Amino acid sequence: MAAVGSGGSTAAAGPGAVSAGALESGTASAGNVKHLALFLHEAVLVQYVDTLKLAVPSLIYTLQNNLQYVAISNLPAATFQVTYQLKILTTALFSVLMLNRSLSRLQWASLLLLFTGVAIVQAQQAGGGGPRPLDQNPGAGLAAVVASCLSSGFAGVYFEKILKGSSGSVWLRNLQLGLFGTALGLVGLWWAEGTAVARRGFFFGYTPAVWGVVLNQAFGGLLVAVVVKYADNILKGFATSLSIVLSTVASIRLFGFHVDPLFALGAGLVIGAVYLYSLPRGAAKAIASASASASASGPCTHQQPPGQPPPPKLSSHRGDPSTEPFLPKSVLVK
């Protein structure tokens, strides 16, 4: 296959080498659609072995999206939002197993705190948790959430491993994921509702509310990319906490959801766990060392004379941006 990139890259160099020149040339020239089509043919079809690697996470992501609909149909929105944070736990476990990633003691403690909070929320749900629709099955909802979290953790780590093990760009990998996801979704749609679609049309039942959900999902995906690029894990933790609060408020207003002390305790533990897990490694070490020093030295009896300014605090990490928890970070913890 002849080179398709403007820099003379060949097919033997892999799809990643092709993508750099092709995308630059394809986007810089307005009307160079043919060049972009040649690149896509080369990277997706000719290098089909590389493309097939994305079939596994794409299948899992498609399954995960359908499991989320099953879960939200059988659980209150607030309960689903809290329980779905188990994906942090599953992602961390798969990262340790598949990527040999190490977690700090604070992160392990936050994962335990997260599991405890979710268990409390589920115990509240099993104990009644206020009135709920008769067609909801909390057991099926919980099973769907757990399966969705497991699939989300595995697919995310598997996708990260593919990205780090090849030279393909993120743009190309997402295109390959989308191709498989679309095909698998259409197969599932035809298998489940093929007769109805053939009789009534593909867009039958697409009310304004449905279009709103579609646009919200698409906008949310783009927004996640913006957060990953321009924000840090601290803000991501706050965003997750805010989503739990907003889901709870909306459930109260729209569905008459009842918040009791048990749910409030579980949700609070989950919010705290998300925040602690999102702390940068340097800040986590600083918190752990400060706690250890305070417990070892006991209460301080020295008092500053009145009218005197406090002595400056010395830090052994001065100048290290990773110890500043509210500075942007270049590396995100999943």
Image: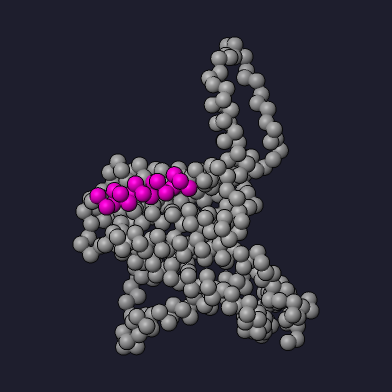
Task: Tell me: residue 97, above or below residue 29.
Answer: above
Look at the image and tell me in which quarter the N terminus lies: bottom right
Task: Tell me: residue 100, above or below residue 197.
Answer: above
| Along the line of sight, the residue nearer the viewer: 295 or 196 | 295
The answer to whether residue 274 is magenta is: no
Q: What stretch is highlighted in magenta?
A: 111-127
| Along the line of sight, the residue nearer the viewer: 315 or 159 | 159
Looking at the rendering, which quadrant does residue 31 occupy? Answer: bottom right
Q: Which residue is drawn at 60% across and 54% down?
A: 101
Q: In this view, does 287 lie to the left or right of 38?
A: left
Task: Tell me: residue 63, above or below residue 138.
Answer: below
Look at the image and tell me in which quarter the C terminus lies: bottom right
- The x, y position of residue 110, in whole percent, is 49, 44
Q: Which residue is drawn at 22% across and 60% down?
A: 133
User: How many tags in the picture?
Assistant: 0
- The x, y position of residue 292, in whole percent, is 57, 30
Colour option used: one colour
Q: Is the magenta stretch mostly helix, strand or loop?
A: helix
Q: Which residue is drawn at 44% across and 60% down?
A: 149
Residue 107 seen by the camera: yes
